[in-house]
């Protein structure tokens, strides 16, 4: 009967581990940069005289900033950040579609629905960061 020997890490294994750590770091850096540029572009999206539109847009910007802070201090992974960004993009897309139906305005029902989605996303970000 042959005994199984425990394999010691080789130089190749160590190099692969280091390479994966570098990839993870670059992915995190890319995600931070994407969030920073997205919030910079979205920060000037206020529409004068449309408080409901501005409320939803401001919440999306705030949540993107919270996610970016989570990435920066290491409490949120790149995968979690990508999921949060996808949720924010979905909400923003729904907001744009609702605005298009009503000449740039949001009805109270649409605002309520978007705010519920923002609340769910906000709770998810909080759970990830704590």
Image (tube, rainbow, N blue to C red):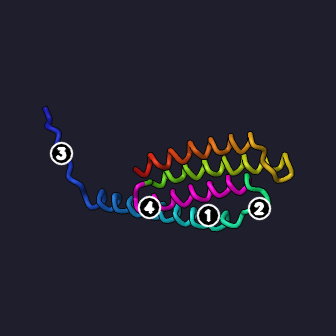
| x and y, in percent, of residue 7 in the image | 21, 48
Left or right for 63, reference 48: left
**Which numbered disc flags the more N-terminal residue, 1 or 2?**
1
In the picture of the structure, the residue carrying the numbered disc 2 is 47
Q: Nearer the viewer, residue 78 or 97?
A: 97
Distance from disc 4 to disc 3, alpha carbons, whole Å, reads 28 Å
Q: Secondary structure at mark 4?
A: helix
Residue named by callout 3: 6
Report helix, strand or loop for mark 3: loop
Q: Which mark is residue 39?
A: 1
Q: Which residues are magenta?
A: 53-75
**CA–CA distance between discs 2 and 3?**
65 Å
Q: Give the mark nearer the N terminus: 1 vs 4.
A: 4
> In the shown orientation, is residue 25 left or right of residue 89?
left
| Residue 18 spot, x, y in % from top left | 34, 62
Quarter the N terminus occupies? top left
């Amino acid at each position: 009967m042959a005994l199984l020997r425990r394999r010691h890490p080789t130089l190749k294994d160590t190099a692969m581990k280091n390479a994966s750590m570098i990839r993870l770091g670059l992915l995190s850096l890319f995600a931070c940069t994407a969030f920073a540029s997205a919030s910079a572009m979205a920060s000037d999206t206020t529409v004068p005289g449309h408080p409901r539109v501005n409320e939803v847009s401001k919440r999306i910007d705030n949540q993107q900033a919270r996610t970016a802070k989570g990435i920066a201090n290491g409490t949120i992974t790149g995968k979690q950040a990508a999921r949060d960004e996808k949720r924010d993009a979905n909400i923003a897309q729904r907001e744009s579609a609702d605005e298009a139906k009503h000449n740039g305005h949001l009805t109270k029902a649409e605002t309520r629905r978007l705010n519920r989605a923002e609340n769910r996303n906000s709770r998810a970000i909080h759970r990830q960061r704590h």
